[in-house]
Image (spheres, rainbow, N blue to C red):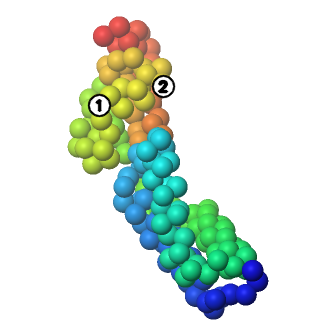
Amino acid sequence: MFTLSVPIWEIIVRGIAVYAFLFAMLRLTGKRQVGQLGPFDLILLLILSNAVQNAMNAGDNSLVGGLISATTLIFINWAVAYALYRSPAAERVVEGDPLVLVRDGQVMQATLTDENITAAELDTALRLAGSFSLASVKLAMLEPNGQVSVWTRQGPDADDAKAA
């Protein structure tokens, strides 16, 4: 239970490598995957965690090995959060920039395609933000955390836009 079958350094290096790999893979799948965790996404994350377990601990099932792996992951997470806090450049690289989905009632189809967002998903996000027509949307942004921020038109034209 307390005896390691592999050196401590190997468990730490494996933990860092798996964290970096999963981070890169999840970052490549786009912002949508992070902000809108559906049932299939949850299943994927659970299976991923099981799939990489042995890659992290090299088959070491000791209590100490598990604690070292957990400590490594927590430390990496803290270090990344600290780097993001201290460096706007690191934040842009890790989290990305917000993307325009709708500008002045016009859908940016290329952005939807790049981020694998369907028209139905965009419509849902707009409705959840209180906008029931594209004409009422001044700007809709896909934020780095996967959420959609919506700004609607103000003033006398806003009522006409909502009716359209």
The residue wearing badge 2 is: 129
Question: Would you say residue 161 is visible in this rendering?
Answer: yes
The residue wearing badge 1 is: 119
- At label 2, the amino acid type is Ala
x and y, in percent, of residue 147 in the image: 48, 40
Question: Would you say residue 89 is visible in this rendering?
Answer: no
In the rendered structure, find residue 148 and report the number of the disc placed on it.
none
User: Left of 90 or right of it: where is 118?
Assistant: left
Q: Quadrant of the N terminus?
A: bottom right
- 6 w.r.t. 46: above or below: below
Q: Nearer the viewer, residue 55 or 102?
A: 55
Determine the secondary structure under disc 1: helix
Determine the secondary structure under disc 2: loop
Q: Residue at x 48, y 58 (%)?
A: 47
**Label 1 Cα neighbours within 10 Å, binned few <14 / some 14-19 / many ≥20:** few
Q: Nearer the viewer, residue 59 or 28?
A: 59
Instruction: Determine which quarter of the picture holds residue 86.
Output: bottom right
Instruction: Determine which quarter of the picture holds residue 135.
Output: top left
Q: Residue at x 39, y 33 (%)?
A: 140
Q: Which residue in the rendered view is the most extreme toward the bottom?
A: 7
Q: Are marks 1 and 2 in contact (CB under 8 Å)?
A: no
- 80 w.r.t. 55: above or below: above
**Label 2 Cα neighbours within 10 Å, binned few <14 / some 14-19 / many ≥20:** some
The count of marks equals 2
Q: Quadrant of the C terminus?
A: top left
Q: Residue at x 39, y 17 (%)?
A: 132
**Marks 1/2: CA–CA distance:** 15 Å
Q: Which residue in the rendered view is the most extreme toward the right?
A: 2
x and y, in percent, of residue 155 in the image: 44, 14
